[in-house]
Image (cartoon, rainbow, N blue to C red):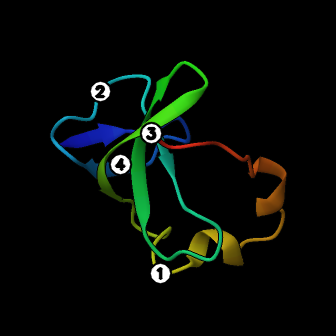
Amino acid sequence: SICLVDNHRICLAHRNTRAGDVVVVFRGGQNLYVIRSRGKYYQYVGDAYIYGLMNGEVTAKDGWERSAEEFSLI
């Protein structure tokens, strides 16, 4: 599916992605993933692709740590 994320970038995401889902990169990771809130946990939905944010480019940008959060997957 093609979608638009909050920072107005075009995202290619899993077909089950829907409004309110979150695109994340895991610390030290190179790929993006879509997760969905399930109360205090998150559920894996599928992979995602956003040009310019793949292959570790997210964590190469200054200040990325300010948006880092810890969460649990179910």
Pointer 4 with pointer 1, Cβ within 8 A:
no
Of the two numbered discs 4 and 1 on the same chain, state the one appearing first in sequence.
Answer: 4
- Residue furthest to the front: 74
Where residue 10 appears, x then y in whole percent?
35, 48
Where residue 57 appears, x then y in whole percent?
58, 76
For the image shown, how many numbered marks are present on the structure?
4
Q: From the viewer's perspective, is 50 left or right of 13? A: right
Question: Which of label 2 and label 4 is nearer to you?
Answer: 2
Q: Amino acid at mark 3?
A: Ile
- Residue furthest to the top: 39
How far apart marks 1 and 2 lie (CA) works out to: 24 Å
Residue at left offset 53%, top offset 35%: 6
Q: Quadrant of residue 29?
A: bottom right
Of the two numbered discs 4 and 3 on the same chain, state the one appearing first in sequence.
Answer: 4
How far apart marks 1 and 3 lie (CA) works out to: 25 Å
Pointer 1 with pointer 3, Cβ within 8 A:
no
Q: Is residue 19 above or below residue 30?
A: above
Report the disc number at residue 55.
1
Of the two numbered discs 1 and 3 on the same chain, state the one appearing first in sequence.
Answer: 1
Residue at left offset 42%, top offset 40%: 35
Residue at left offset 29%, top offset 27%: 18
Q: Is residue 16 above or below residue 58?
A: above
Report the disc number at residue 74.
3
